[in-house]
Image (cartoon, grey):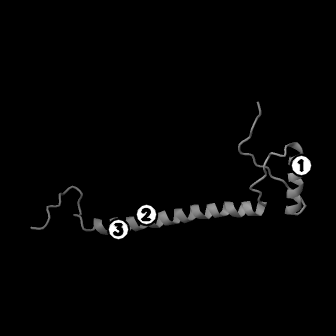
Amino acid sequence: LSLVEANMSIAIRSRTSGSDLLRSIQAAVAKVDPNIPIYGVETMDAMVADSGSLRNFDLTLLIAFSALALRMRKEIKVSSKLLPASPWRTYAGPG
């Protein structure tokens, strides 16, 4: 039986440039098993920027729904002015 990790991430800190570091990692992995693919390589700056875009999307949705709720509240206040003053009386309509 072989143990396969379906989703594995590794973070590496180095003073080496990105392309040189990637080549050395690929060589080290190939020594262990040349069939293991290396993909989705990103710098930490790119990962942080990507996580910020998701946060910005969440904040945009929050603002949009908040504005919608405030607009709906305003509409409810306007329409409630058309109702009778007392909630205990039934509105009979004109005439």
First reached walking from the N terminus: tag 1 or tag 2: 1
Task: Between label 3 and label 1, give the one nearer the viewer.
Answer: 1
First reached walking from the N terminus: tag 3 or tag 1: 1
The residue under label 3 is: 75
Could you say where residue 60 lies in the image, as x and y percent from the top left?
55, 65
Q: Secondary structure at mark 2?
A: helix
| Residue in view at x 78 percent, y 49 percent | 37
Could you say where residue 77 lies in the image, as x and y percent from the top left?
33, 66
Q: Amino acid at mark 3?
A: Glu
Position of residue 36 in the picture relative to residue 20 (left or right): left
Mark 2 Cα within 10 Å, few/some/many (few <14, many 20+)?
A: few
Position of residue 4 in the picture relative to residue 72 (left or right): right
Residue found at the far front of this picture:
35
Quarter of the image for the C terminus: give it: bottom left
The residue under label 1 is: 28
Could you say where residue 88 lies in the image, as x and y percent from the top left?
21, 55
Q: Amino acid at mark 1?
A: Ala
Q: Nearer the viewer, residue 43 or 6?
A: 6
- The CA distance from mark 3 to mark 1 is 65 Å
Mark 3 Cα within 10 Å, few/some/many (few <14, many 20+)?
A: few
The residue under label 2 is: 69
Q: Amino acid at mark 2?
A: Ala
Position of residue 12 in the picture relative to residue 77 (left or right): right
Mark 1 Cα within 10 Å, few/some/many (few <14, many 20+)?
A: few
Q: Nearer the viewer, residue 68 or 90?
A: 68
- The CA distance from mark 1 to mark 2 is 56 Å
Figure check: 72 above or below 26: below
Task: Between label 1 and label 2, give the one nearer the viewer.
Answer: 1
| Residue in view at x 85 percent, y 62 percent | 18
Q: Are marks 3 and 1 in contact (CB under 8 Å)?
A: no
